[in-house]
Amino acid sequence: MARTNRSTPTLDRPTGTPASPVGREPHPLTGAELALIEETAANGAAAAESGPPAPTLTPPGTVGSTPAAGVWVSGQKVTALWADAAPRNAWLHLEAAGWKKLAGLGDTGSTAMSLVAAHARATGAAPVLDEDPAGTVVTLYVW
Amino acid sequence: MTEDFSHEMAAITRALDDAGHPWVAAENAITRMSAEDRAKRLGVPLPDPATRAQLDQRAARVRSDLTRAVRSAAEAALPAAFDLNDVGGVSYVAGVRDQGSCGSCVAFGSVAVLEGTARYTRRTPSLDVDLSEAHLFYGWGASVGRTCDSGWLPTPALTFCCDRGVTYESEWAYTPGNSSGGSLPAGWEQHRAKATGLVDRTSDVAAIKAHLTQYGPVTGCFVVYTDFFSYSSGVYEYQTGREEGGHCVAIVGYDDTQQAWIIKNSWGTSWGMSGFGLIKYGQCYIDTWSNVAVTSVALRTWTDPRKVIGAYSTGHDNNGWVYVQDVGWLHVGGSGVSHVAMFADLLTAKEKAAYVNAYSDDGTITQAYCF
């Protein structure tokens, strides 16, 4: 499967139907997809050597909960989600901050971020997130 | 009160009167026992003369340091008081237990260290972590020849807790002398706690305090004199009586204003202040004989039915986490699709405010029921 050019959400506000076609149905993995997964696994292994970060904040109301401060973005609900057929190209839309890309250091990691973002959208919870200098969401908490 | 202790109590009362009532003595379940039964509850072998001389020197230094006007930088950075029973209104200390007629106090002190550390390091005061003193004493202790009559010491006990682990109380319930005939069940290693970071803070008052505030309880061995049996409240310091034996408790806090350690004893709730007490710094070797602790406790167990109240991801592969109520953060195990599948199930449970039972293998969920 050739990589598609990584597009970005074009709608400013989440209305109507998605701007691009719905993704493909589940299918047996091709050789190219398997190769991509192996590349992802290698990337994951490299990350594992330094250890992916563990959570440091705790839910509100629990003992020791630490309110997000400083660079953390909080208090904004997820009002839309976007993804296209390119791998690891998922985005969320926050009420005031707008579209932000979700980090995807691997396929599983990208999927997990999408799940958490989708969960925030479904529950109406305002996530607490941290982003890198490029504005990509690298840490996502949902209470 | 037995006849022999009524004589002792009179002497204790006189001594306390003469000393200006530093603490209060009262009849309790311990003073009502025979001398023989009281002695059975002292489970730490008294030090030999050479060791005793060392302990005396250390204790003298501790008491001398207390009078210094200038504290070390490390000690000055610590709060003036700290109590694991009340950290911002929350207690991380499990209920007081009763070792009964057996010199198993080291097991009770060591288990209190594990349970308190497990809760405090996770900041989960309701964490279900009731561990088996029976396994530690009648299992590991017995494997190295320890009995109710011989007693033990905290360092080897906590070493077993680190190297081998200890199961939960539900697997092997404690009875004095193991009179119930309990034994270690097969498969116990799937339901156990295992400590890491065994540390020795003996004779370092600042280090003991720092450990309490950072990680949790610390053991404390000390010489028991006759008057200690009658302790009811106040700050204990030796007044009168003979040397009865050695004992081990868990130190769960301190108070510089009272110059005392807060201890959790294992003689039931009729002794002391509902089973707790205050022992003055530098008294009876409480801070110079064996102050041992751990820095973390890994748990391998099914959670009780609990809700998922938090989720976390960073985009790294296999780095999804969920916060389980009363348990804390658990890493979602599995790799690739299995990780995603479990994570999706747990997020769904969170969305539905449904209960989950998750098997935590040292902090990683390897199996989850989401109802």
Image (cartoon, helix red, strand yellow):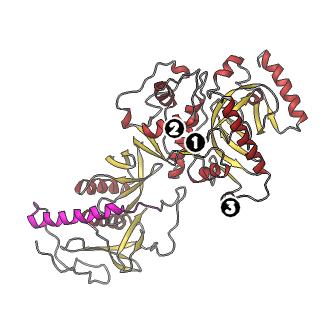
In this rendering, the answer to whether B244 lies above or below B212 is above
- Type of residue at label 1? Val
Density class for disc 2 (Cα within 10 Å; few <14, some 14-19, many ≥20) is: many
Q: Nearer the viewer, residue B99 or B241?
A: B241
Task: Read off the chain for label 1.
Answer: B
Q: Given the image, on which type of amino acid does mark 3 rest?
A: Ala
Mark found first going from the N terminus, 1 or 3: 3
Q: Position of residue B23 (x, y in %)?
A: 81, 37
Labelled pair 2, 1 in contact (Cβ < 8 Å)? yes
At label 3, counting other C-alpha atoms closer than 10 Å, the crowd grade (few under 14, some 14-19, many 20 or more) is few
Is B272 left, or right, of B348 in this rendering?
right
Is A27 left or right of B118, judged from the image as shown?
left
Percent across and percent down for residue B135 are 47, 29
In the figure, residue B361 lies in which quadrant? top left
Amino acid carrying mark 2 in the image: Leu
Label 3 sits on residue: B73
The residue that disc 2 covers is B158
Residue at 60% of width from left, 30% of height from top? B105
Identify the magenta region: A28-56
Q: Chain of mark 3?
A: B
